Image (spheres, coloured by chain):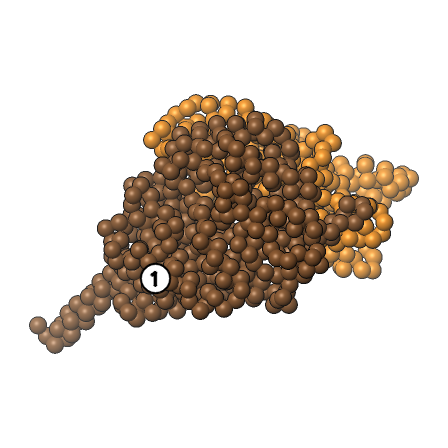
Chain colours: A brown, B orange
Amino acid sequence: MTPISRILCTTSLTAALTLGSAAQAEIEFWTMPYGDQIAWKDTIDGLLEGFTAETGIEVTHETVPWGNAFQTYLTIAQGGAAPDCADMYWLHSFSAIGGENYGPLPITEYADRLDLDSFYEGALTDVTYLDEIYGIPWRGDIRAILYRTDAAEEAGLSGPPTTWDETVAAAKAMHVADENGNVDRWGYAFGTSNVVSWLMPLYWQAGGEFMSEDGTTATIDNQAMRDALTFMHDMVHVHRVVDIDSFEKGYEMLPLFVDGQIALIGSAEQSWGKRLDAEYPDAEGTWAMAPSAAGPEDADSFSGAGYFGVLRGTEQVEECVSLLEYLSQNESILALSQGSGNVATKPAVMQSEFWSDRPWKQVVAVALEDAHTSQHAAPSWSAIATSEPGGIIFDLIYNTVVLQEDMDAEIATAQELMQGELDR
Amino acid sequence: MSEKNVFCYLMVAPALVITLILGIYPMIRSMVMSFRSYDLLNQDKNGWVGLDNYRQVMADDRFVQTINQTVVFTFVAIFFVVVIALFLAQVINAEFRGRAVLRTLIFTPWFVPPVVASAIWIWLLNANVSPINHFLLEAGVIERKIRFLTDSDTWGPFSIPMMSIIAVRVWNGLPIAIVFILAGLQSIPKSLYEAADMDGAGTFSKFFHVTLPLLRPVLLVLLALFFMNGFGHFEMNYVMTGGGPRNLTNVLAVWTYQEGFQFLRFDRAAAAGGIVLMMTSVVAVLYIWLQAKDVRK
């Protein structure tokens, strides 16, 4: 072999080995954006750089806008182009749609590497389906009361309401309207733009559960549902402290709250605390958060969650699990919650300085004690809980609260439709 | 086949291939899906069901209401677009000081994507913060705020939210209609108007006997495009109201999207898509027939 041939052979071999090892140590990772997009990208990039430095595995990060996240993951669950691992939600639906070919991949055999015992027990229900583990719950979305302290003071209130009755009294006291009925300040608003998420905590607070634990039986035709819907109905039509337009699409609570047009939001996202700090610094001193008011049974708060998991079809399962292992560390979870504004999923992280340096953060930590997951063990739950006309729970709320149709008949219809969906 | 023909086919081929792959193939797949059970959550039961999906959607009161509204939305929006565009095209076709400024103002909505326009109008029409409400209240024209996008009172098929969205669709659709009509107006020989003047024709007489007949081919194309686009319109209704309140602003494209992507029933969504296809096909066939009739003449 001539020297030139030897050099060529060596170079080719080295290149092949390098390419081979590079191909093995590269994974694609998708997340949705949270809060300020640049800050979020910086957070993720920082974490991934740390991961690469520690493991040598390169990670390509891509952001999926929330506007088409559902369609993206639906396409993935149908066999569309998928990353190796990703930030996901609606585990039960996408697992059922993808079956054993596409969508989320169970990683139960790697569970002991993920330190799952260090997470909130409730958060783990969002990564468990049919006794299999699908990833690490990295973000929580806990809801709490958000109220205008200036309006409360003006109305002579000593503090936030702690029960449904106190909520009614506080909302009426803070409501301001002129003689023509034009409202300057609504006493109350239920929550975010997702109407279905308003009913959930009220129903739980009244002692209800939407379905049996195994997700096979609908359980909404009961007194708890009547209590929850009656509370909503009365706030709109009897006490007249809720804007009926808030049930329609496009109604933005937070700007109206900041503008002083809403006095109290019953189930506000905790991330609004971060947004108020960052986007409305002038509003400092005019607002506060408080744990959810208690209903007839308890003070459950709506809690959503998302998880990092692995997708079927990847050949980099081991590398993806290494990434999840890295991201499940307390420092990573803290960085993720700092970057996104979402509640951390580990008690140890929620006890950190970051989660106690502002009064609203302390409230969030307390609210977590009453967290009730919004996920249910039924693949069709995402369709049942769709906050659009035609959605079973949405129509139940809209028909009974906005249109004031017969409550018993509507609940019976919803129960029947929901059972049909669970039997799908 | 002559060399010239081969060249022509080669030039058309890329567009044809793209249309086949991105237009015709998905359309055929969707039509096939509309005759099958295709439930994402229960794919074991997927199979041929004949016309069941069509029967199911037609038995849904919300769907029938949605079809009616789609037709009303489309006809009313097109009527106003064409009437206003005919008037404005005449205005900006005339020569006067400030014509360039007026043209720019009229064409501005064209530069605004429908989704962005919807977001802007949501704010303008939000009962609580609407500057329109503020102005009307201050002027003493109204005593209570108008709920532009949320009032569920109806007058026959009409409601305030429906009229509000129609107004926005007219605003957004005007520029393209004006461009078409303006091009048509500029192709009419001035000698015809001079002849009409000599015959003593007035403004209206000239419009109805010279302008309108000579604009017929342009208006036909415009109407065909608008009807086909109108029956499949999605963005503004979805972004501004999502079909609410009480389904009063729902249109077929939004209903189809909700059925497929929210409720995961792609079979029923495909059936709804099939109905949209039938509606647009009627317009297309009518348009081709009228075109052929003109050619025969």
Q: Position of residue B99 (x, y in %)?
A: 79, 57
Mark 1 Cα within 10 Å, few/some/many (few <14, many 20+)?
Answer: many
The reply to whether residue A164 is in sight is: yes
A95 relative to A241 in the view: left or right: left
Query: Looking at this view, is A251 or B184 the one in front?
Result: A251
Q: Position of residue B185 (x, y in %)?
A: 75, 46
Query: Looking at this view, is B92 or A231 the one in front?
Result: A231
At 15% across and 69% down in the image, what residue appears?
Answer: A9
A299 relative to B284 in the view: left or right: left
Q: Quadrant of residue A395?
A: top right
Tell which subunit mark 1 falls on: A
Q: Quadrant of residue B148?
A: top right
Query: Looking at this view, is A222 or A275 the one in front?
Result: A222
What residue is shown with label 1? A327
Q: Position of residue A306 (x, y in %)?
A: 41, 52
Q: Quadrant of the C terminus of chain A?
A: top left
Q: Quadrant of residue B177?
A: top right
At 75% across and 36% down in the image, what residue appears?
Answer: B213
The reply to whether residue A313 is in sight is: no
Count how many numbered circles sit on residues in the image. 1
Q: Amino acid at mark 1?
A: Leu
B238 relative to A54 in the view: left or right: right
At 29% across and 57% down in the image, what residue appears?
Answer: A114
Q: Secondary structure at mark 1?
A: helix
Query: Looking at this view, is B226 or B158 the one in front?
Result: B158
Q: Residue furthest front?
A: A158
At 61% across and 61% down in the image, what residue appears?
Answer: A287
Q: Quadrant of the N terminus of chain A?
A: bottom left
Q: Residue furthest right?
A: B200
